[in-house]
Image: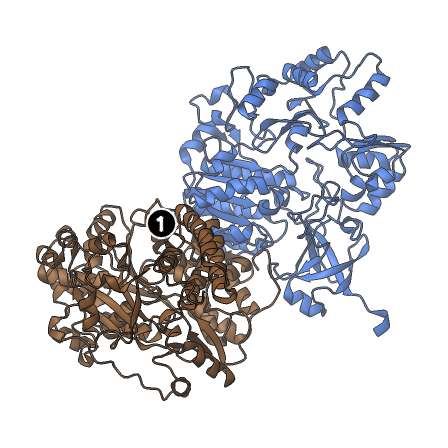
Amino acid sequence: MFGAGGGTVSYEEIETTDLIIMWGSNAREAHPIFFHHALTGVRNGAKMISVDPRRSQTAKFADLWLGLNVGTDIALANGVGKCILDNNLQNDEFIAHSTQNLEAYRESIDEWTLARTAAVTGLPEYAIAELAEAYATAPTAQICWTLGITEHHTGAENVMALCNLSLLTGHVGRYGSGLVPVRGQNNVQGGGDMGALPNKLTGFQDVTDNKIRAKFEAAWDCTIPAEPGLHLTLMFEAMERGELTTVFCIGENPADSEADINHARKVLEGLDMLVVQDIFLTRTAELADVVLPASAGWAETEGTVTNSERRVQRSRKALEPPGDAKDDLEIINMIADRMSPGWGNPSAGDMWEEVRAVSPMHGGMSWERLEEHGGLQWPCPTIDHPGTLFLHGWLWEPDLAGRDPAPFTVNEWRPHVDQVDDYYPLLMTTGRVLDSYNTGVQSDGYNSPIRSGETLDMNPTDAANLGVETGSRVEVSSRRATIDMTIRVQPDLPVGLTFTTYHFADTTDTNQLTIEAWDKKSGTAEFKATAINVEPKVNVSNA
Amino acid sequence: MPEIAVTDARGTEAERNAVADSIAIQSPGLITFDAIGPALLFDGDRVARSGAERIFNRRHLLLPVLHALRDAIGHISQGGVNEIAQALQIPPAEVFGVASFYELFTFEAAGADDIVRVCDDTACRISGALALSSELAADGRVVHASPCLGLCEQAPAVFVQRTGEQHVSVRSATKAKVDEALAGTMTTPVPPVPQDRADLTLLARVHDPLAVDYDGYVARDGYQALAKAVSMTPVEVIAHVSDAGLTGRGGAGFPTGFKWSAVAGEDGPRHLVVNADESEPGTFKDRVLIEHDPYSLIEAMTIAGYALGAEQGWIYIRGEYPEATRSLKSAIAEARSKGLLGDDVGGYGFCFDIEVRLGAGAYICGEETALLNSIEGYRGEPRNKPPFPTTSGLFGRPTAINNVETMVNVNQIMMLGGDAFAKLGEGRSTGTKLFCLSGHVQRPGVYEVTYGATLGELLDLAGGVVGNMKSILMGGAAGSFIGPDMLDVPLTIEASRENGFSLGSGVVMVLNDTVDFDDFVARIAQFFGDESCGQCVPCRVGTVRQSESLLRIRDKGARVEEERVMLDDFAKVMADASICGLGHTASGAILSAFDLGLIGGSQ
């Protein structure tokens, strides 16, 4: 089904594709392994276009960088779509055969002329046209995105707008062309695939589907709720209402990573019971009633991981966890055994056999085969199936393999929620740097020569207007809070846009500033757009 | 800024302008790249163009830009490195890595506009270079010791590297002459021709002051060889070169026709590169040809371009040849203005042009693949072969690389025909050869003889030896010492080899009994230690150990027999396991000096 949560192409395909569009992805810093494959593609002659409000490290490798205004991706995507149609560059045969709903789409983007798109995105018209032509005429092309697309209150629609472009041009479902949501952690894909989602059971199977639920209830000998549960953002709302009173938090640090962090921390503090299972005493763990020290996933545990090309690989234990820390699986088994005596201590291998039994897309992935082949890409339903290189090949089959044509969708552009005004005249966007990992739990435990601590990066013109320079201490306020930060002058930012990370929450609690405005479909908050005011700190001794 | 910034230093206005100007102008000789201006181009602050292809097309500008920066401000500054890094989108560490490879680039302001580089190598060392050096330094000048400057026949030689002014070579240098050069009042007399002009072909126009410009060249049979070449097919031209038995005159002696056939047989685009890096101590023939008969090289290259189907020619000339460079560039510009370089050469219907690139002081850049890397904008480190330049050379394209003297022979071959050319000389040593006579001879200079003349006859042409001859260094630092018993050996590739030495680039440096051989040979060892590019352990370590050994003998009276045991060991490792010819030949001359009993004179 179109839209299933996984990259549609394989890493090997990006090495021979003709065009790579990094749209809201700073893969150079945030996905360095994947970026190696992209660079191989560039060395083999691929063109790269980067669409990003700032000229990131990834953009520096690109043939063309387009610095659109924050939160105008739907506008740009719609403008590109209209430009393709106006210039008759669409793939008529593919559209007729494999898609539906073109007319509704065409009508919805009719207002997105080059002039209007340019006005909203801040890009010159020729640049928009160049992007459109490059994508439509490339023999093979991939659009890669990550949080630059999803960390908006219109995140899900941003993705759908990009999917429309792939349907317009036939750049999906065939070798070398596709859509690549590059996953953040090495196993965030796997986490979702195993069913750590409120609406999906293992193998991305819908909990609302009666047949699916029945299968799992039989396998697990229990009753499963028929309605989806709460995702993280809904959980916080439920905590605030006092409906959710007990939380078991495994390997997540919401006390640092949530938007509008002061609010989030208050809510967590109000819980009746908070249990945290993690490798370090994080800020969330400090709030907990019980802390269960766990194992480091990449070295101290046995199992599998799944990456952005849907490849499931074996992960092997190399060390014992230190002190009293235990394997994550063992901890869960110990709790389960107390809740349901006789549960025992099933191994990762035992668990995996059960996964294969209930999840068709993992069906053929025995541990032996995973080892033999260096990993297999789902769907891999049977023991002799080689795994699946790219998804949605059915779009190109004569009868669409019995499925319905993939639909174009209508996506309205809405500006980001936290708008600048006279009181908060600068826009702050957040992102990640190569060396650090989100709130730093997995990366701050060791030294690195390129980790320099937190700064608020600012364009030289803005810095000059404020009378600050690299190293100046400033007070940064949003509509929610004020924190102190250090300035770094960064010529690669457009005027009016500042940038920071939240890797150093101990010293710079960036998420106090960010807004919780979240996407109703995905639950992700709009980390990418916060209106701020910056004031140089007055040195008391000079006052 | 590129990712890892060494510092935040920005260039001064002078530095920024020097960098920007040098990449803004499309050189008329460079026709194979459609790339001028910076590698990173902004349109406002929302659109930028960069990317792999754009950056790749500009990487070769790195060495010319470094020259431009250095010539503008006198050294390579931190801010200048960062400006270059920005303009060409090369990481600053890499810009620094390339700049630091070359002897002529320094990183601190010298404290003066002029750096006086005094050659203290072989021929100049025995002609008073060290005393001259002390004299100049005592006078407050900034003096650096230099390896061989290719002016051995007019030793001692000084290269004055200036800031904001043209560089200058001072020949037969004295302190007074150096001062004149700096004041702009020095004159360089044209030396008399030592041989009877009637006997000469390659040197026929050299030292004839009337032959240096285009009209003079044409009046003396210039461009007739090209006319002959285009009256045949390219394949026929190459056949003549093969039939002539022409072999490389740079020292390696590879058959030229074979090389050209290989390149012509590959798909285009193809490149022709002329190696004018001439840095083998004792060698100066190419310099003389370029200074005094530049058109012969241009014409020969044009013929080669036609024969190979190569539209782009390059001349890589060492940075210490300022007069030769000026003479060459002037001749190329004039040839272009006469339609003899460019889109339709001479109306003959093919396209060929020549781009001149300067080295910056690195002997290893005379190795063909190191030279290619240097042009491409990388450190001048030799490549592993295969692949050979004929299949993958400059920018990965099929490339013919030839020495200057080898090239100008092509004009002769066109005029005589391949078979007639092959009748000159002896056996496989066909045609005439240029020999560089220096050291203790009456009339040092470039001499042209037909292959087969004896060493004794050559010395007679040069007026005989000065003093009691002890030894002759044949082939330069990469060659070997021979004794006075070799005067009857015919100068051919085969006969020399039979007698245990090689003609190499044609160096014949005569050394009498006033030479301190411990010091002379230690200087050769030091030369290789300095010039090793460093990329492979056998040469990087071996040349240094060798140098230390010779210095122990010279300075500490170390025992020759003991040192010889170690030297044999180093020699074996370097010969067996070095990547390139520098490592392979670094011990030859030194061991031959031991064999002749020249070392340990104080023992």
Any idea which chain is the blue one in this picture? A
Q: Amino acid at mark 1?
A: Gly
Q: Position of residue B338 (x, y in %)?
A: 20, 72
Image mark count? 1
A406 is higher (above) or lower (below) than B405: above
Which element carries disc 1, helix, strand or loop? helix
Q: Position of residue B438 (x, y in %)?
A: 29, 72
| Left or right of A494 on screen, residue B298 | left
Residue B139: percent from left, percent from top: 50, 86
- Which residue does the image show at 45% across and 49% down from the upper left? B569
Residue lying at 32% horizontally and 58% vertically, measured from the top left: B32
Q: Is residue A76 left or right of residue B499?
A: right
Q: Is residue B231 above or below residue A448?
A: below
Q: Which chain is brown?
A: B
Question: For residue B182, what is the image quadrant?
Answer: bottom left
B31 or B309: nearer the eye? B309
The residue drawn where x is 23% and y is 52% is B498
Q: Chain of mark 1?
A: B
Q: Which residue is mark 1?
A: B396
Q: Is residue B581 left or right of residue B211?
A: right
